[in-house]
Amino acid sequence: MTYSFLDLLCLLGSVAMFLYGMKVMSEGLQKAAGDRLRNILSAMTRNRFTGMLTGIVITALIQSSSASTVMVVSFVNAGLMTLAQSMAVIFGANVGTTFTAWIIALFGFKVDTSAFILPVIACAVPLLFASASRKKSIGEFLIGFALMFMGLDLISDYVPDLQSNPEMFQFLERYASMGFISVLLFVLVGVVLTAIIQSSAATFAIVLIMCTKGWISFDLACAVVLGSNIGTTITPLLASMSGNVAAKRTAMGHLLFNMFGIIWTLAVFYPFVRLNVDITKWLGQGDPNSIFGFVNDLEANDPQLYNSIFDNSLPAGHPVLAKIAQMQFSVSFGLSMFHTIFNLINVTIMIWLTGFYVKLVEKLVSSKHMGDEEFQLKFISGGLMSASELNIAQAEKEIVVYAQRVQRMIAMAQNIVHTRQGDDFTKQFSRLEKYEEISDRMEIEIANYLNRCSEGRLSNEGKHRIAAMLRIVSEIESIADCCYGVAKILIRKQESHVDFNEEISHNIDTMFIAVEAAMTNMLLLLRNFETADQTEIITSYNHEREINNLRNQLRVANVENINEHHYEYQAGIYYMDIIGSLEKVGDYIINVVDEVKEQFRQKAAG
């Protein structure tokens, strides 16, 4: 039997179905959980042990250590988690990923997957048409679960039969009989294979099938599984490339954790494999090494029976089939045990070295100069888009930074009011103009990021939050425009050779103080977007009324002052233009508060 190009495409399609099933399952769970999944990570990382437990639970739930570590990178990038906390979660994620291996081992071979795949899909599809978004998300989760096992079943059918391809078999045989060098080569195979398909679980599934059919020995299968632990770090490394320094350090810590684990395991590789074989036998699951010799002896002594086994021509109750099935489960159990014990020992050792890891990655990934990132987005980036529901937290943090930067423009505008014409005025005006350009750029980048998030799979709550955040970003940009507008009014004032007296300057300062207080209160609400305090919202409305009342008072007083010749009519015009611009700032601030209030109201109703 030759292995055709069509068979290769079918294999790739099977792997793709397996990966897509995990992706749909993960996204469905994220949508069903909504904010709760994000809150779990921020609440359960108070110390290294709860952080490790969080990593185990999250990875076991979403069935992908790559996905959970990318989420951790995202949280560190968003400032929701420290580097030390992220290390503990990543340590746990490596244990949690063994859960998938056990599912594949225990159900993939012991249970006829076709017996439950179609019933699961039958139950899931009606949920997709439910009106409640959470039911739809649960339906997606079940569909993903079914597709994952359907892909696993198809991988088993389309993995190339090396025994039927002599040239390929001789090539592998030459590299499989080189002792410890073969182990190193197959570790590299695991690294490369997992890096390409971006999933250690998929690699485990492929190797499991190859090993149970007697194509490679158990110890070399363990070597591939070992290498897959490094290959799976590629995904978070790619995700961190466009993130900040903390995100890069988190991804590097994940890589180092697995590299150090593999180094000590390779130092005791053969005894460690024997330990796992002994544990598997002690638990009554047979010898994982036996199938390789059994299948090869069968091929040498009874080729006809061997071919009948693998072309499915033997009757279902044949004793050889029953014996091979028992050996297959022994191998799957042994590989899962190897994967689990490796990660458990690794975590047990490394959890005490969290501080060392933090210091090491800080040295390996040095921080940039503060000035280098002064006018760059701090928390969000295009590379971290693996989990749309979770990326909202990054945008929330970035909006706070955006508002803080715009708040500086209020102080700049106030300073420039008191600056006379000359080099100092030109310098301050240029700085304010530069900040206004930066605010425009930040608005576009944050809005684009939110739009990309909205294209992903989101809960209804997530969609409403993104819509509110887009409106908030627009209002903050309008505040920046008003501040720049004040500076342009002053340019016109200088061109008209008009001066402000002390009374006008004092009144403008009073208005600036009121606006600054309102802006500070708005920032307080943005920092606590999900847990807004009702009293702070009321305070914001009080600030708005104060700004409006002050504007009205100054407007009435301006007419009287002009009539009483306190200052020129033209000075009064520019003065009122500035007051009007600052009053608009108050309007934009209260628009932001209204959006926060609406989110607060929806959360209370939910």
Image: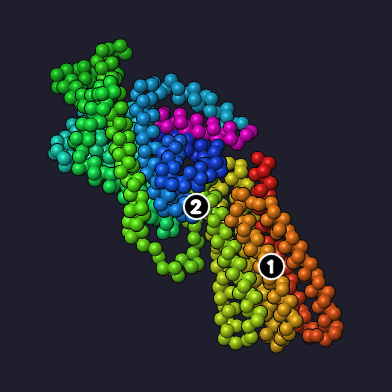
Amino acid under disc 2:
Leu
Nearer the observer, 164 or 229: 229
Query: Is 564 rendered above or below residue 238?
Result: below
Q: Over which residues does the magenta segment extend?
A: 131-151
Element at label 2 = loop
Q: Residue 455 at what x, y percent from top left?
A: 54, 47
Chief secondary structure of the magenta span? helix
Q: Residue beneath label 1, please?
A: 515
Residue pictured at 32% horizontal, 41% vertical: 348
Residue at x 28% of width, y 47% of height: 259
The picture places residue 86, in percent across and down from the top left corner, at: 42, 49
User: What colour-coding does the image apply?
Assistant: rainbow
Q: In the rendered image of this protein, does residue 546 appear above or below residue 9? A: below
- Where disc 1 sits, the SS reads helix
Q: Residue placed at 58% from the left, 27% from the top? A: 126
Asked if one can make out residue 1 in the rendered structure from this viewpoint, the answer is: no
Query: From this viewpoint, is residue 353 visible?
Result: yes
Badge 1 crowding class, 10 Å Cα cut-off, few under 14, some 14 to 19, many 20 or more, is many
Give residue 203's position: percent from left, percent from top: 32, 37
Q: Please name the residue shown 56% across and 81% down the image.
A: 427
Q: Report which residue position mark 2 lands on.
A: 80
* Amino acid found under the numbered disc labelled 1: Val
Viewer-proximal residue among 128 and 181: 181
Q: Position of residue 300 (x, y in %)?
A: 14, 22
Residue 5: say if magenta: no
Q: Is residue 22 left or right of residue 576?
A: left
| Quadrant of res 410 | bottom right
